[in-house]
Image (cartoon, grey):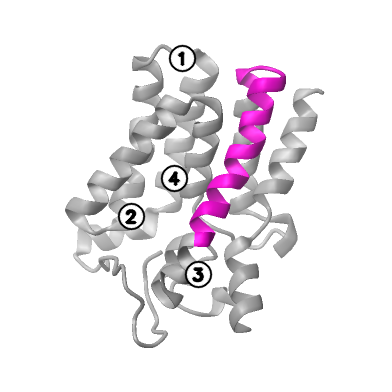
């Protein structure tokens, strides 16, 4: 199997908009029309609670993990990196939503690193949990965890494909959180509530 084939598989897997599909099937609601308008797990969890948010988290992780792990085991770390990066790209601009704006890639990035470099992905997930517990800002946790990836990859002795992937992933996640960074600087970013709100309300974060 060629690296190009793994890239195609990764992109198709990443393009599966589970947040959109799950909410549409269960609620008859376009998740892009509520909350932050994002199809990712954060917006799903904010607006419909953990009953829907948690499955989306796991599915978004899986669509990064599967292609990246397959590429790594069957071919090489480079193939795994390409497949994982393609899955992230698919999550951002999903084929199945006609390349419309997708999610911010955080869970899919985590899954990709668990497939390519499990230690990096696992420690990165721990960084996310610690930052989220301390701040209750999903955006801070996501940015901090993403920025830790290239340093972790280098410190743990992974080769250049994984280190470069970490740098690119960090840049991508930070770029997609530009609006969140502005709100953090302005003091208007919303803290995450683990329990579902009583009603669907407009949110500026997710």
Instruction: Give the dominant element type of the magenta stretch: helix, strand or loop.
Output: helix
The reply to whether callout 1 and callout 3 are in contact (CB within 8 Å) is no
The reply to whether callout 2 and callout 1 are in contact (CB within 8 Å) is no
Residue at the image point whose x is 40% and y is 26% from the top = 150
**Residue holding disc 4:** 173
Quadrant position of residue 27 = bottom right
Residue at the image point whose x is 58% and y is 46% from the top = 62
CA–CA distance in space, label 2 to label 1: 27 Å
User: Judging from the image, what secondary structure is the residue with disc 1 in?
Assistant: loop
* Label disc, if present, on residue 48 of the rendered structure: none
Where residue 2 sits: x, y (%)?
A: 80, 23
Residue 29 in sight here = no
Screen quadrant of the C terminus: bottom left
- In magenta stretch: residue 176: no
- Answer few, some or many: residues within 10 Å of disc 1's Cα (few below 14, many 20 plus, some between 14 and 19): some
Residue 134 in sight here = yes
Give whichever of discs 4 and 3 has the lower sequence position: 3
What range is drawn magenta here? 55-79
Q: Nearer the viewer, mark 1 or mark 3?
A: 3
Residue at the image point whose x is 77% and y is 38% from the top = 8
* Label disc, if present, on residue 158 of the rendered structure: 1
**Residue holding disc 2:** 139
Q: Is residue 7 left or right of residue 197?
A: right
């Amino acid at each position: 199997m060629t690296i190009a084939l793994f890239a195609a598989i990764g992109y198709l897997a990443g393009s599966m908009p589970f947040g959109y599909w799950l909410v549409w099937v269960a609620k008859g609601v376009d998740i892009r029309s509520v909350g932050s308008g994002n199809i990712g797990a954060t917006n799903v969890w904010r607006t419909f609670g953990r009953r829907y948010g948690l499955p989306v988290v796991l599915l978004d992780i899986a669509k990064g993990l599967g292609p990246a792990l397959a590429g790594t085991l069957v071919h090489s770390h480079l193939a795994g990196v390409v497949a994982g990066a393609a899955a992230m790209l698919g999550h951002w601009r999903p084929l199945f939503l006609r390349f419309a704006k997708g999610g911010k890639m955080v869970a899919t990035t985590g899954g990709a690193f668990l497939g390519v470099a499990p230690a990096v992905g696992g420690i990165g997930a721990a960084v996310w949990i610690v930052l989220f517990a301390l701040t209750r800002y999903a955006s801070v946790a996501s940015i901090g965890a993403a920025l830790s990836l290239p340093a972790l990859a280098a410190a743990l002795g992974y080769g250049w494909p994984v280190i470069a992937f970490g740098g690119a992933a960090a840049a991508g996640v930070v770029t997609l959180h530009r609006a969140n960074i502005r709100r953090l600087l302005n003091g208007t970013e919303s803290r995450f509530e683990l329990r579902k709100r009583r009603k669907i309300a407009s949110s500026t974060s997710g």
